[in-house]
Image (cartoon, grey):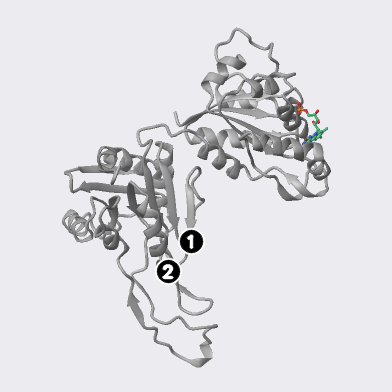
């Protein structure tokens, strides 16, 4: 299991958004137990959380005192993280003060590990010194506060107080979990997506990569317990949760950030479709069609994989080879030329797999002798397989540790 989370839901209008938070956390392999305040049940029926979490929801401390795992002290031995989302003004102040007069506030006092609080309330309530002081107090004691957003609130007012986006809350929660899983302790760098090379002030040279495979790999690595940096160009898919994103645009920017991040990485998976060529001299301003035809001089972009492969010490290096036809010899040649430890080959001529597609079929080959075929499957599953197949080599490599 990726992590064990107690999700506390209190009585604000944003309580319905916690259902989505629960789903996001479960999708990432977390076990979640839900405690609701009595007032929260006015907004969402506990059954919704019970069905989705697969566990009874605790509302009263007296609900099921004999049920294992429900009692607050027993639960506190189980949980890695207490996430209170939404946190009402009332719950935030109670937590800061140490009041324990219902199941959630009692659990908050019994909880032993990290605490994440996502407040949501009307903007006047948000600005109250009582609330602000409570949150500062919680923060000074080590709780992490996800600041609410500004915008239109459910009550019709406009201002700060709207619950932060559910993806951000889930991301913060995942980032606070202790590393657990077969890749725990490893720091993995993944590059993803295309790069964009400027032609003039508005036009770019790019490629069809959506970033899906690299994002799937970053997500799978985090789900398997690794600490993950994702270095990405402009993506056509949502960022993964629980990883550190580093967005760049050009190959030059990617090269710079790659040099920095790879220094601290145990393994690097270079999945990004970095430009092979870029305009020698991007034109300032916007090119005008009325000026007639145009020839753009291109220069080759330095090979980022080969650059990293030549360094010592360096992270375990896995490169991706998109080949027309499942040409293993070409892939092995590429692995050798780049000084890589492994190559993941995918056949871009096969319909429905590879670039832009949601599925992939790959062959994993390594200098250490791995030769493994992953049959066609969703990119999430393919990513998981790649990491599991290479996990032994990844753990054995660990430069300088
Ligand atoms: C329709 C409605 C919406 C509410 N929304 C919020 C809210 O977003 N944030 C908040 O702090 N309180 C909100 N309240 C007030 C809380 O429900 C109230 O303070 C309650 O005592 C909180 O109880 P709890 O903290 O035990 O859940 C709302 C009340 C109503 C009637």
Report the residue at 42% width, 69% height from top.
Answer: 206
Report the residue at 43% width, 55% height from top.
Answer: 231
- Is the residue 338 above or below the residue 132 in the image? below
The residue singled out by tag 2 in the image is 206
Residue 133, image x, y percentages = 76, 38
In three-dimensional space, the C-alpha distance between marks 2 and 1, rounded to whole angstroms, equals 10 Å
Give the camera-side residue of 244 and 9. 244
Q: Secondary structure at mark 1?
A: loop
Local packing at callout 1 (Cα closer than 10 Å; few below 14, some 14-19, many 20+) is: some
Local packing at callout 2 (Cα closer than 10 Å; few below 14, some 14-19, many 20+) is: some
Ranked by sequence position, the earlier of labels 2 and 1 is 2
| For the residues bearing labels 2 and 1, Cβ distance under 8 angstroms | yes
Report the residue at 49% width, 80% height from top.
Answer: 200
Q: How many discs appear?
A: 2
- Is the residue 55 above or below the residue 259 in the image? above
Residue 159 in view, yes or no: yes
Residue 194 in view, yes or no: no
Q: Secondary structure at mark 2?
A: loop
Q: Is residue 38 left or right of residue 23?
A: right
Residue 396, image x, y percentages = 25, 39
Q: Is residue 57 left or right of residue 4?
A: right
Quadrant where the N terminus sits is: top left
- Looking at the image, in which quadrant does ligand 1 appear? top right
Residue 219, image x, y percentages = 44, 44
Quadrant where the C terminus sits is: top left
The residue singled out by tag 1 in the image is 234
Residue 348, image x, y percentages = 30, 57
Numbered badge on residue 161: none
């Amino acid at each position: 299991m990726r992590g064990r989370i107690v999700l506390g839901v209190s009585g604000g209008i944003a309580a319905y958004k916690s259902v989505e938070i629960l789903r996001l956390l479960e999708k990432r392999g977390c076990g979640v137990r839900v405690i609701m305040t009595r007032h929260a049940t006015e907004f969402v029926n506990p059954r919704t959380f019970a069905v989705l979490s697969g566990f009874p929801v605790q509302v009263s401390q007296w609900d099921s005192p004999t049920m294992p795992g429900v009692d607050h002290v027993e639960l506190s031995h189980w949980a890695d993280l207490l996430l209170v989302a939404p946190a009402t003004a009332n719950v935030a102040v109670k937590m800061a003060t140490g009041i324990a007069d219902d199941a959630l506030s009692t659990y908050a006092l019994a909880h032993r590990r990290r605490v994440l609080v996502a407040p949501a309330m009307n903007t006047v309530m948000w600005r109250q010194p009582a609330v602000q002081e409570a949150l500062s107090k919680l923060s000074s004691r080590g709780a992490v506060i996800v600041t609410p957003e500004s915008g239109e609130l459910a009550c019709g007012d406009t201002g700060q107080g709207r619950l932060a986006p559910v993806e951000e809350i889930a991301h913060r929660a995942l980032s606070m979990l202790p590393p657990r899983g077969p890749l725990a302790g490893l720091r993995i760098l993944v590059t993803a997506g295309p790069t964009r090379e400027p032609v003039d002030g508005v036009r770019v040279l790019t490629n069809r990569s959506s970033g899906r495979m690299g994002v799937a790999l970053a997500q799978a690595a985090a789900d398997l317990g690794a600490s993950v940096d994702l270095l990405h160009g402009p993506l056509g898919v949502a960022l993964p949760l629980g990883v550190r994103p580093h967005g760049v645009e050009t190959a030059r920017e990617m090269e710079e950030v790659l040099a920095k991040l790879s220094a601290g990485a145990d393994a690097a998976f270079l999945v990004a479709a970095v430009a092979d060529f870029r305009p020698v001299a991007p034109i300032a301003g916007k090119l005008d069609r009325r000026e007639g035809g145009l020839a753009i001089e291109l220069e080759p972009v330095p090979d980022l994989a080969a650059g990293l492969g030549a360094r010592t010490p360096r992270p375990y290096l896995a490169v991706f080879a998109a080949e027309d036809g499942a040409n293993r010899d070409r892939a092995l040649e590429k692995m050798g030329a780049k000084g890589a430890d492994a190559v993941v080959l995918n056949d871009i001529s096969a319909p429905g797999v590879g670039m832009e597609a949601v599925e992939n079929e790959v062959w994993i080959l390594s200098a250490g002798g791995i030769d493994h075929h992953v049959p066609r499957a969703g990119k999430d599953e393919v990513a998981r397989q790649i990491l599991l197949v290479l996990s032994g080599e990844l753990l054995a490599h660990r430069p300088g540790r």
